[in-house]
Image: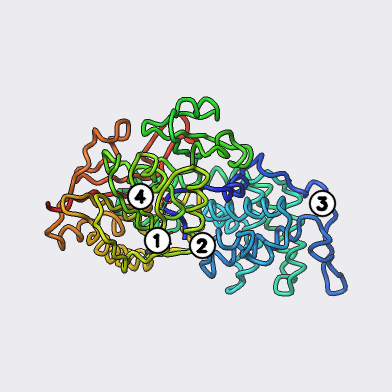
Amino acid sequence: MVGGGTALLAPALEGAVGLSAPRGGPASKDRQTSKGRPKSGPSHVEPAAEARPGLAVRMAAAKLLSAVVDSRVSADGLTDPAGGHPAFRALDARDQGLVKAILVTALRFRGTIGAALEGCLDRPLPAGALSLAHLLHVGAAQILHLDVPDSAAVDLAVAAALADPRNRRFSGLVNAVLRRVSREKAELLAAADPRRDTPAWLYERLVAAYGEEEATAIATLHRLPAPLDLSVKSDPERWARELGGIVLPTGSVRLAELSGPVTALPGFEDGEWWVQDAAAALPARLFRAMGGKRIADLCAAPGGKTAQLAAAGAKVTALDLSASRRKRLDGNLARLRLDAETLVQDLRTYQPETLFDGVLLDAPCSSTGTIRRHPDVAYTKGPEEIEKLAGVQAGLLDAAAALVAPGGTLVFSNCSLDPVEGEGVARSFLAAHADFALDAVAAAELPGLEAAVTQEGFVRTTPATLRLSTPALSGLDGFFAARFVKNS
Ligand SMILES: C[S@@+](CC[C@H](N)C(=O)[O-])C[C@H]1O[C@@H](n2cnc3c(N)ncnc32)[C@H](O)[C@@H]1O
């Protein structure tokens, strides 16, 4: 599951540095790749993948792309250093970085790449030739969007076709199509329609929710990697200066780009800040004065919001169903030198001795608000998950409501762009709970981000919400938050 907009708090972000590397991204070994044309035909024996620099990377990228698109496996899981796909784990760190860059690019620009390939094929690929299509997508992603020599991208795609009995007879086609993509690159990119890079099911839902213009803006922004936002314990101006970023109106520090691991940045070791999208930092702020209040963070790991609550002086009890995620939560709190009681606990069966002044439910969701960081989400999730997750959230919200003391505050949030998981769940909750009222958020509570407060008093952000001087500095994760108060 993609964490609720808290991109990452810990070293895991290292990989993400290479993930979205466009031109100028991770150096590749392809510069040493033989430029000789691969021979085809039954008598020719292709070198083993590991013997040909860069081939194992392309083959792994195509396998991972297939796992995401055909089997709906999350890219985070596939590229996990310990439990990831074997073809990925077999590579060294540098090659793993290149696989991630290719995978993320192939997914981020999947519509553009598909249209380019279609335009360069004389006739459609045979039905069921999925692995061939993935090879072509991997090749075209490098040619159109990555800083890899076109000749290496073509040669290695042909070599990958020759190395796979299913695709061997198509090696000539791979060569011809990718060469044409390379030749016609400028025209193909100029003709690209950004809307096609958001899959149709999602684009349609975005249009229904936000209208054509906003949906197009969101789809266009999905093609850019998200900036890196940090929540700082104190003195955002100082950290913006030290890290070369800007301070957002919400107090988060934003870096447009990162040239190394986040763990190497000043202040990481000292626990002065944590990675958290500025939108993900909004729900915890809705509790107003937190000093000394008892607040339960019910879906807490990896802990971005727990850290905010603890840093603001609340006495926090942080629950998570998952023992391994609770471990991450504990590790993050330890680095940040912040205190909270942490429990491995299903919130639905949690029976505290005393009810809480405040309860935060940052519920599991489809995570469509994080597509800029996790473009796989658009392919691993679909309308059916959204409906199902909305039902799960409603159940969790009922259980969360039972933990709120009279007069206490309940905040519900998630990182979905879909109103079925946000506004819909909040409205149904209010309709079913006469003991709660909406505590409407006022625009003045979010100075500089007033547009994120809806007429109804909910908080709603999308990647198109915060427009700053450059696209690389702009945008927020998609987030929803509602605040309720329990009758006294
Ligand atoms: C969206 S993530 C939370 C992100 C977190 N609030 C943050 O800001 O870092 C959702 C979390 O809810 C946890 N979770 C899901 N169902 C749960 C349940 N029934 N009880 C407790 N935790 C649950 C998941 O393990 C996951 O860690």
Q: CA distance from mark 2 to mark 3?
A: 41 Å
Q: Toward which corner of the image does residue 186 lie, by quadrant?
A: top right
Classify the position of ligand 1 by quadrant: top left, top right, bottom left or bottom right: bottom left
Name the side, left or right, on which 44 lies relative to 96: right
Foreground: 28 or 240? 240
> Pointer 3: what residue?
33
Q: CA distance from mark 4 to mark 1?
A: 39 Å
| Residue found at the far front of this picture | 353
Mark 2 or 3 closer to N-term? 3
Q: Residues within 10 Å of mark 4 (few under 14, many from 20)?
A: many
Q: CA distance from mark 4 to mark 2?
A: 20 Å
- Residue 201 badge: 1
Q: CA distance from mark 1 to mark 2?
A: 33 Å
| Amino acid bearing label 2 | Ser
Q: Residue at x 38, y 36 (%)?
A: 466
Counting from the top left corner in percent of width and height, residue 105 is at 58, 51
Which one is closest to the eye, mark 4 or mark 3? Answer: 4
